[in-house]
Image (cartoon, rainbow, N blue to C red):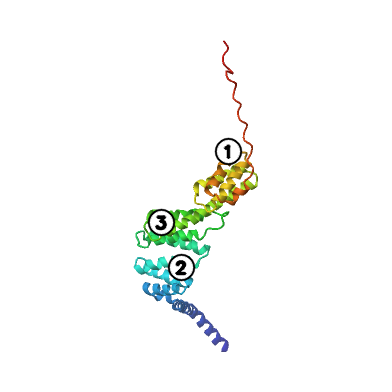
């Protein structure tokens, strides 16, 4: 009798199992929903909370609220501000991965709202996110070139914006980074006995980055490369320019000996080669 009762009870549980599992699953979903209060907020409420956390210097914690504000009302003022501040949160948190995310979100904002009154700021911040990823001069130059292009786009598109002056200063910094790369490559060629290739790099640097902070060094190295190539006239021009532009340069006290001048052509005697009569 006991065995029969246990068997009936087991069959009852088996029949009820699917329903019980469904109830447990629904209960679990409701529980998860209750654990995420952000989903219950309006765009304005979520934006306000996100801005509060940003003000407390907690960009990672602010980001879900700012993103939610945009997702709830993507075309409202609150939604737009949420999207922009979400990009700012990545920028403020910093680090290569976050700066890549910031750049992408600034670009997304400009694509969605090209006529926004925040467009100049967004363009500036996109350039800053790229500039923040610039590494050593001997590494990949893609971020430097993109940052330079982004700052130049700002000056072209928004020449009177409040960010234009600062962008000009940052352009000089980025160009310095690109010039530093050229100097490093030239020095490499010079160190390994390829002075002609080195001279080409130094000349490219001086022609394309005339405001380089180490221009004095580039001029000296150019002269040295020409000396090692046996090009006396070109070396003299480089050292003369160094003396003219940097009259107090320490390099002037250690100029290398110039290669010998080519032998002068001996003029032909008068009348030589004249037809005989």
Circle 2 residue:
89
The quadrant the C terminus occupies is: top right
Q: Earlier in the sequence, mark 1 or mark 2?
A: 2
Is 44 left, or right, of 187 in this rendering?
left
Task: State how far apart marks 3 and 1 are (Cα).
Answer: 43 Å
Residue 68: tell me if it is visible.
yes
Q: Secondary structure at mark 3?
A: helix
Q: Earlier in the sequence, mark 3 or mark 1?
A: 3
What's the residue at 55%, 43% (across, down)? 240
Q: Earlier in the sequence, mark 2 or mark 3?
A: 2
Count residues near mark 2 (Cα–Cα under 10 Å), then give few for <14, some for 14-19, many for 20+.
many
The percent coordinates of residue 41 (x first, y second) are 39, 75
Q: Nearer the viewer, residue 185 or 14?
A: 185
Q: Nearer the viewer, residue 135 or 277?
A: 277
Is 130 left, or right, of 116 in this rendering?
right
User: Pointer 3 and pointer 1: residues touching (CB < 8 Å)?
Assistant: no
Circle 3 residue:
154
The percent coordinates of residue 250 (x first, y second) are 59, 51
Q: Secondary structure at mark 2?
A: helix
Q: Nearer the viewer, residue 177 or 22?
A: 177
Count residues near mark 1 (Cα–Cα under 10 Å), then give few for <14, some for 14-19, many for 20+.
some
| Mark 3 vs mark 1: in front | 1
Is 59 left, or right, of 276 in this rendering?
left
| Mark 1 vs mark 2: in front | 1
Task: State how far apart marks 2 and 3 are (Cα).
Answer: 22 Å
Residue 107: tell me if it is visible.
no
The percent coordinates of residue 164 (x first, y second) are 40, 58
| Mark 2 vs mark 3: in front | 3
Count residues near mark 3 (Cα–Cα under 10 Å), then give few for <14, some for 14-19, many for 20+.
many
């Amino acid at each position: 009798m006991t065995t029969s009762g246990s068997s009936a009870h087991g069959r009852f549980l088996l029949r009820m199992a699917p329903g019980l599992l469904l109830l447990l699953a629904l209960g679990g979903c409701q529980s998860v929903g209750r654990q995420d209060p952000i989903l219950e907020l309006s765009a304005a409420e979520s934006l306000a909370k996100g801005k509060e956390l940003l003000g407390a210097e907690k960009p990672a914690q602010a980001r879900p609220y700012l993103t939610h504000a945009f997702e709830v009302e993507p075309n409202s003022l609150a939604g737009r501000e949420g999207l922009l501040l979400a990009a700012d949160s990545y920028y403020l948190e910093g680090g290569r991965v976050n700066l890549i995310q910031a750049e992408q979100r600034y670009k997304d904002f400009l694509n969605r709202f090209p006529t926004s009154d925040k467009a100049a700021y967004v363009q500036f911040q996109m350039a800053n996110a790229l500039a923040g990823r610039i590494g050593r001069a001997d590494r990949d130059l893609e971020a430097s070139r993109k940052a330079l292009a982004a700052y130049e786009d700002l000056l072209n598109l928004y020449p009177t914006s409040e960010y234009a002056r600062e962008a000009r200063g940052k352009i000089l910094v980025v160009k310095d980074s690109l010039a530093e790369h050229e100097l490093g490559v030239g020095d490499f060629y010079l160190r390994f006995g390829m002075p002609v290739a080195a001279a080409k790099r130094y000349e490219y640097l001086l022609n394309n980055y005339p405001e380089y902070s180490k221009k004095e060094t580039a001029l000296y190295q150019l002269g040295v490369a020409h000396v090692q190539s046996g090009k006396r006239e070109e070396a003299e021009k480089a050292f003369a320019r160094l003396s003219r532009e940097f009259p107090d340069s320490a390099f002037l006290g250690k100029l290398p000996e110039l290669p010998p001048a080519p032998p002068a052509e001996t003029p032909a005697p008068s009348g030589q080669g004249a037809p005989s009569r």
